[in-house]
Amino acid sequence: MLHRLKRTLLSLLTLSGVCCSGQALADEVQVAVASNFSAPMERIAADFTRDTGHRALLSFGATGKFYAQIKHGAPFGVFLAADAKTPARLVAEGDAVADSRFTYAFGHLVLWSTQEGAVDDQGAVLKTGDFRHLAIANPKTAPYGAAAIEVLTRLDLREKLQPRFVTGENIGQTHQFVASGNAELGFVALSQVVVDGQLTGGSAWLVPADLYSPIQQDAVILTQAADNPAAQALADYLKGAAARGIMLTYGYSFAEGAGLCLKGSTLQPSC
Amino acid sequence: MLEGIDLTAILLTLKLAVTTTLILLLVGTPIAWWLARTRSRWKGVVGALVALPLVLPPTVLGFYLLVSLGPHGPIGQFTQWLGIGLLPFTFAGLVVGSVFYSLPFVVQPLQNAFSASGERPLEVAATLGAGPGDRFFTIALPLARPGFVTAAILGFAHTVGEFGVVLMIGGNIPERTRVVSVAIYDHVEALEYAEAHLLAGGMLVFSFLVLLALYSRHARPWT
């Protein structure tokens, strides 16, 4: 009796396409996306569906949080992290497909304010500025937060500015603290304040690459999606020219130490 | 085992809950009194507004608080004009958020208590010559005492259990806005499960004891 009930339930689930049928899931992949990459990824996912027919369901959050969720069985197929360390760790621990790891982009850190002229192009505002709050992402879980701490440490300002920190749960919330004007300044991802190569508003200091370790953003296919064609298709798509073209307009680069430069509010490949 | 940072979070949470509960009892009593006795057609509107935090996700409240308390928002401009600056990322900001968030948990038990004691004792007192203020303080308030105890316990416990609003307007600042629920979230995200267990387990026991006290006191916790 119990056995029959179980079989009926399973077939119902299969019919509705929710469970247990490899075929039904084949053209859909759940993707964990680091918050900094949310804007370009939404566009890439739309193009991906248009070009390949596969669907990518996107979740956004802090890299460290996704790591914890994946370790506890979260049903993601592809993970786009904001660092290289976390995907490598998942591979080492057997949660991700070993040869699937690749670098999809290098990210850049900016100090940003919604006020015109509030941030100078040398970041001197950090030393002299009269501001109450400096927003950073949680350095424990968000690589852009860790990079911000590195910059402040190198500039010997960490101790001094610590009391003014407000910490966002991820880089998305950090951006929101600044965008709403509640924090005068914040370290956010370049991709959050740049569209089509132009600063969307306010003022920003593109932090020089030698002040922090490169934000190498790696992706992996997770073990549970090793046989999902949509996962592999998405990985391939991210390496292609169409996706890279979109990433470029958001200020990502594809080689370590690329000499990006912010002239006024225009992003340039070099100074 | 309990680190200084977590101890600070516990003390801050208790401070927030006590402050919020006291303010809510002061603000909630006249609202509940009015709701219990009015025949105005606005009763439905005010009752619905008070109950909103019961059904809204805390993110809605947190988002609107962040925007309206911010430098471009109406409340933010008002607080700046007053010279007290901006409320997000401050303890005062958390108090404001918590007062909105826990409002129904204080107003509804009070309203029920005022309604339950009925008009009769007040009418009798009036015929004996008691004025409105006298009737309120010597008749209505003492009769509604169980309601006040329930309101205070629920307001306190609900504020201790707050998370979403605090996360959105707090900024996770030690000693100022990092309450226990946020500290737990931090520990879990950073895979510090031992610390998370300690705080989360403590929260579970605390919440159970509070509700046990409430439900053991009398059979109907909402009156």
Image (cartoon, helix red, strand yellow):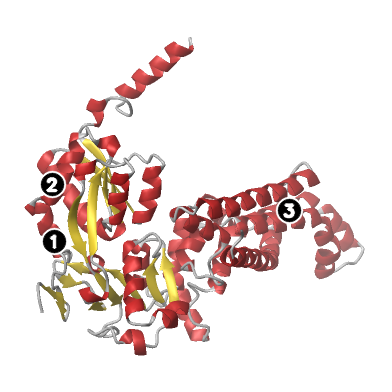
Q: Position of residue B43 (x, y in %)?
A: 61, 56
Name the mark on residue B150: 3
B187 or B168, nearer to the observer: B187
Q: Position of residue A75 (x, y in %)?
A: 34, 39
Residue bearing mark 1: A254
Quadrant where the N terminus of chain B is found in the figure: bottom right
Whether residue B63 can be seen here: yes
Name the mark on residue A191: none
Asked if residue B165 lies left or right of residue A174, the reply is right
Q: Chain of mark 1?
A: A
The count of marks equals: 3
> Which residue is located at x 28 percent, y 50 percent?
A87
Q: Please, what secondary structure does the residue beneath circle 1 have?
A: loop
Which residue is outermost to the left?
A241
A42 or B56, nearer to the observer: A42
Q: Please, what secondary structure does the residue beneath circle 3 have?
A: helix
B196 or A60, nearer to the observer: B196
Q: Few, some or many C-alpha atoms within 10 Å of disc 2 (few <14, some 14-19, many ≥20)? A: some
Q: Chain of mark 3?
A: B
Say which amino acid is labelled 3: Thr
Asked if residue B50 lies left or right of residue A270, the reply is right
Say which amino acid is labelled 1: Phe
Whether residue B65 can be seen here: no
Say which amino acid is labelled 2: Tyr
Residue bearing mark 2: A237
Which residue is outermost to the front?
A92
Q: Please, what secondary structure does the residue beneath circle 2 have?
A: helix
In the image, are marks 3 and 2 on the same chain?
no
> Which residue is located at x 32 percent, y 79 percent?
A154
Dot placed on the residue nearer the N-terminal end, 2 or 1: 2
